């Protein structure tokens, strides 16, 4: 179990505790202001990634001071964890409202609308303060003439979209807005700022999943579909064996490789049961 599970999950996976999605958290003015600020300006995110490049060019001892401070703040304010589709399904089992919205990261990195993000609420759509706060931001990319605004979608449709995105190698990740309140689930790839920071810029603001993938060698036919699907470079092919193997230390446990394996050779195992992966 991760630090968050101990602190906010009462021994369970923290993001499966329904209370962490409760709207009463939004009566905290600091949190609602943080959400408003977060969604207001895609340019701000773009600037942050550029600042990160500057930081990565600084001496190692400077990075060693600044990076933990940034990560510490992110853990308190806006932190993410990868989760597989079965845990998304479990969350969808207890939330009442699912709202699809344009991704601020794609707006920042691509300048285009990609509706890959989902806000979640325990209350019916008409009563969701979270939806109300985000709508009130009024940013063009959320509500402008070329976008559909915040759409309330049936859970079945949303889950189908998650599966389609997984088939395109996007990973699911759950996010806090002033921890432990969880506001939604995103679908990430290299255009996502958190992915860039975590996987490409050595600033881990998104935790690995509570799982790790493993290959059943007897079932693997060596097609390598999983290698091209994995965004973390965790799968290696052995020419001698004609099969792949997953390096547990690099695996984020997203389950994307599993979705791409036609031989059903890949399974997810609880991370704590795999000694080589348990510590990260
Ligand atoms: S997709 Fe499946 S069968 Fe193909 S290499 Fe990967 S584990 Fe083996
Ligand atoms: S090997 Fe791990 S990180 Fe790569 S796709 Fe599979 S589950 Fe995700």
Image (cartoon, rainbow, N blue to C red):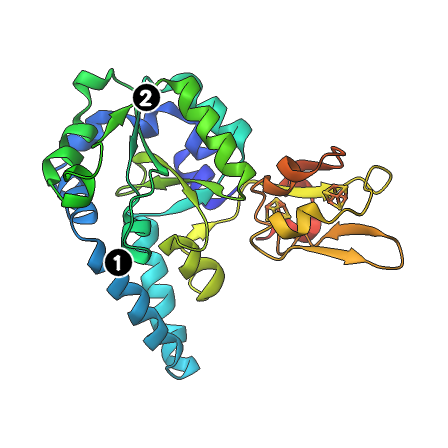
Q: Quadrant of residue 184?
A: top left
Residue reaching furthest to the front: 146
Q: Quadrant of the N terminus?
A: top right
Q: Position of residue 243 (x, y in %)?
A: 82, 50
Q: Give the residue at the far right of this rendering.
A: 240
Give coordinates of residue 256: x percent, y percent: 59, 41
Q: Residues within 10 Å of mark 2 (few under 14, many from 20)?
A: some
Is residue 8 visible in the rendered image? The answer is yes
Is residue 278 in view from this perspective? Answer: no
| Residue 145: quadrant of the picture | top left
Which residue in the structure is indicated by mark 2?
153
User: In the figure, is residue 257 to the left or right of 95?
Assistant: right
Residue 33 lies, in percent from the top left, at 13, 43
Q: Position of residue 207 (x, y in %)?
A: 47, 49
Q: Is residue 66 above or below residue 150?
A: below
Q: In front here: 185 or 6?
A: 185
Residue 82 located left or right of residue 241: left
Between residues 143 and 120, which one lies in front from this camera angle?
143
Which residue is at a point 80% across and 47% down the rendered structure image? 222
What number is the disc on residue 250?
none
Q: Earlier in the sequence, mark 1 or mark 2?
A: 1
Q: Which quadrant does ligand 1 occupy?
A: top right
Measure the C-alpha gap from mark 1 to mark 2: 27 Å
Which of the labelled discs sits on residue 45, or is there none? 1
Q: Secondary structure at mark 1?
A: helix
Q: Residue at x 34, y 57 (%)?
A: 72
Q: Is mark 2 within 8 Å of ligand 2?
A: no
Q: Are marks 1 and 2 in contact (CB under 8 Å)?
A: no
**Does residue 75 appear to the left or right of 213 in the view shown?**
left
Assign a secondary structure to mark 2.
loop
């Amino acid at each position: 179990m991760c630090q968050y599970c101990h602190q906010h999950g009462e021994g369970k996976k923290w993001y499966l505790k329904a209370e962490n999605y409760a709207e009463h958290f939004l009566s905290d003015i600091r949190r609602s202001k943080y959400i408003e600020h977060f969604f207001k300006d895609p340019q701000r995110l773009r600037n942050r990634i550029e600042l990160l490049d500057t930081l990565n060019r600084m001496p190692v001892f400077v990075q060693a001071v600044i990076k933990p401070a940034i990560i510490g703040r992110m853990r308190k304010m806006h932190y993410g964890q990868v989760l597989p589709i079965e845990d998304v399904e479990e969350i969808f089992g207890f939330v009442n409202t699912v709202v699809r919205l344009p991704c601020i990261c794609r707006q920042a990195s691509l300048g285009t609308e990609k509706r890959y993000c989902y806000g979640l609420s325990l209350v019916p759509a008409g009563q969701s303060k979270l939806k109300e706060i985000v709508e009130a931001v009024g940013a063009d990319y959320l509500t402008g003439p070329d976008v559909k605004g915040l759409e309330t979608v049936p859970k079945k449709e949303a889950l189908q979209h998650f599966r389609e995105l997984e088939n395109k190698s996007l990973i699911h990740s759950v996010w806090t807005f002033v921890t432990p309140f969880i506001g939604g689930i995103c679908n990430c790839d290299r255009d996502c700022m958190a992915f860039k920071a975590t996987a490409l810029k050595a600033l881990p603001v998104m935790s690995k999943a509570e799982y790790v993938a493993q290959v059943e060698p007897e079932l693997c036919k060596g097609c390598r579909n999983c290698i091209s699907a994995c965004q973390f470079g965790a799968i290696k092919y052995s020419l001698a064996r004609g099969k792949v193997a997953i390096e547990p230390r690099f695996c984020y446990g997203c389950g994307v490789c599993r979705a791409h394996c036609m031989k059903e050779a890949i399974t997810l195992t609880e991370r704590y049961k795999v000694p080589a992966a348990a510590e990260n």
